[in-house]
């Protein structure tokens, strides 16, 4: 089982939709995926309800689970987190991987730097947790400012030795939670590769 915590200290940076989409793609690829909503605002539950699954059972392979439900049968557990997340929170220590979404704008990038510093400073508390990468979201290709911010994100990631996923474009598909356009698919593909390596090592 691979546990991924989606985190950023800021609100409104795409944590919940990144969690949702990555899980959808992983389930589509054939994995059993559990979603855990650790945000008291319960954004994942809102999405499930909106799509007609108030019980959290999205498909046979994809479900939202409430603790203390066991995750033993899942290939992946994806955990959505609240903003203002402190670097030492248990859901970070629990993760194999941390995934950090960010909007390519000035304030967000400043906050990202602080968050990466916090993660670095609290690394001792969770030595086995690695950063899967930073995923820029709501990217508007025609905005020069967004391009400049992508460069800053890359530079920042380079300083910390982290990788950056291809930016997820601003898209109307997100308001319907539709998979059209392959949004966030590269994140799931990366996780599938890592999961395969993990399974091979364990064998
Ligand atoms: N690529 C995108 N295209 C369009 N809207 C997006 C995109 N990414 C995020 N959003 C929207 O941005 C808002 C904030 O995203 P959300 O996942 O709720 O952030 P957080 O969980 O960090 O508070 C939501 O309304 C979401 O639908
Ligand atoms: Mg959220």
Image (cartoon, grey):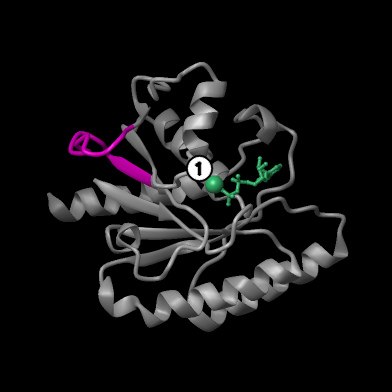
Q: Residue furthest front?
A: 40
Q: Is residue 158 magenta?
A: no
The quadrant holding residue 154 is bottom right
- Residue 64 x, y percent position in the rendering: 37, 31
Q: Nearer the viewer, residue 182 or 65?
A: 65
Camera-side residue of 44 and 149: 44
Which residue is at a point 74% across and 53% down the rendered structure image?
Answer: 139
Percent across and percent down for residue 146 are: 79, 63
Q: Quadrant of the N terminus?
A: top left
Q: Please tell me which residue is depicted at 45% across the width and 47% down the height of the picture.
A: 39
According to the image, label 1 marks what residue?
Answer: 41
**Camera-side residue of 74 and 182:** 74
Say if 110 sits above or below 196 in the image.
Answer: below
Main structural element of the magenta stretch: helix, strand or loop?
Answer: loop
| Ligand number 1: quarter of image | top right
Where residue 175 sits in the image (x, y, percent)?
69, 32
Q: Position of residue 66 (x, y in %)?
A: 30, 35
| In the image, farthest residue toward the top | 52
Is disc 1 placed on a helix, strand or loop? Answer: loop
Residue 189 as seen in the image, left or right of residue 156: left
Residue drawn at the location 40% of the way across and 31% of the way down:
27
Task: Say how many tags the image has.
Answer: 1
- Residue 70 falls in image quadrant: top left
Q: Residues within 10 Å of mark 1 (few under 14, many from 20)?
A: few
Rendered view: 99 above or below 153: above
Measuring 58% from the left and 62% from the top, which residue is drawn there? 10
Write the start and end of the magenta stretch as one range: 65-78
Disc 1 under 8 Å from ligand 2? The reply is yes
Q: Is residue 153 left or right of residue 106?
A: left
């Amino acid at each position: 089982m691979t546990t991924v915590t989606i985190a950023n200290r800021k609100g409104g940076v795409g944590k919940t939709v990144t969690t949702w989409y990555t899980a959808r793609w992983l389930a589509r690829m054939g994995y059993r995926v559990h979603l855990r909503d650790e945000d008291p605002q319960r954004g994942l539950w809102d999405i499930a309800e909106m799509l007609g699954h108030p019980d959290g059972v999205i498909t046979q392979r994809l479900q939202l689970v409430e603790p203390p439900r066991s995750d033993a049968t899942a290939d992946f557990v994806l955990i959505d987190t609240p903003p203002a997340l402190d670097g030492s929170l248990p859901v970070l220590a629990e993760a194999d991987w941390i995934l950090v979404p960010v909007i390519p704008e000035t304030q967000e990038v400043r906050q990202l730097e602080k968050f990466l510093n916090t993660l670095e400073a609290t690394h001792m508390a969770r030595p086995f947790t690695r950063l899967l990468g930073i995923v820029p979201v709501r990217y508007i290709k025609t905005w020069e400012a967004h391009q400049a911010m992508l460069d800053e994100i890359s530079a920042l990631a380079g300083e910390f030795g982290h990788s950056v996923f291809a930016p997820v474009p601003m898209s109307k598909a997100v308001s319907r939670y539709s998979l059209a356009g392959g949004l966030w698919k590269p994140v799931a593909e990366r996780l599938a590769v890592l999961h395969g390596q993990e399974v091979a090592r364990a064998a």
